[in-house]
Amino acid sequence: MTYLPEVYKDFKKQYPKIAKGYDALALACHEWGPLDEKSRRLIKLGIAIGLNSEGGVRSHVRRGLAEGITADEMRHAVLLAFTTAGFPTMMAALKWAEEVISKKK
């Protein structure tokens, strides 16, 4: 992955051992089971939406696009949050996703 937010870069510099452990755990969880890469990324996007995590939504949309997930597939994942997470949460996530998508054009 080429893009990392400044806050995470700073965290890695200040706490390299903790960051290394975090990265290893995240990778192990991501690769563990039978789900394919696309499914894992879309699920993680859905979790970020449910948490109303702007950074998480932006990150997973950015990474998904880089991995070949289409903008419409990302939008569909966001719209699925409407009836589960609520209209305001879905709308915020849609705004963040669209901002990332528009930068990729």
Image (cartoon, rainbow, N blue to C red):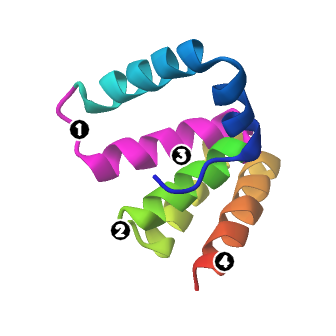
Q: Position of residue 79 (x, y in %)?
A: 59, 59
Q: Are marks 1 and 4 in contact (CB under 8 Å)?
A: no
**Looking at the picture, does residue 98 appear above or below residue 41?**
below
Dot 3: element: helix
Quarter holding the C terminus is bottom right
Residue on which disc 2 sits = 68
- Residue 4 - label: none
Q: Marks 1 and 2: in contact by CB < 8 Å?
A: no
Mark 2 → mark 1, Cα distance in angstroms: 16 Å
**Which mark is in front, 1 or 4?**
4
Residue at the far left in the pictured view: 34
Seen from this angle, which residue lies furthest bottom? 105
Name the amino acid, label 3. Answer: Leu
Q: Residues within 10 Å of mark 4 (few under 14, many from 20)?
A: few
Describe the element under mark 1 as helix, strand or loop.
Answer: loop
> In front: mark 3 or mark 2?
2
Residue 45 lies in the magenta-colored region:
yes
Q: Which residue is mark 1?
A: 35
In this rendering, does residue 80 appear at all? no
Identify which residue, 40 or 5, lies in the foreground. 5
Which residue corresponds to the image point at 45% horizontal and 58% vertical from the top-left? 64
Count of numbered marks: 4
Which residue is painted at 66% across and 17% down in the image? 15
Residue placed under numbered mark 4 in the picture: 103
Left or right: 77 in relation to 98:
left
Mark 4 belongs to which amino acid?
Lys
Magenta stretch bounds: 33-54
Mark 4 and mark 3 lie on one chain; the one further toward the N terminus is 3
Mark number for residue 45?
3
**Closer to the N terminus: mark 1 or mark 3?**
1
Of residues 22 and 54, the one drawn nearer to the viewer in this rendering = 22
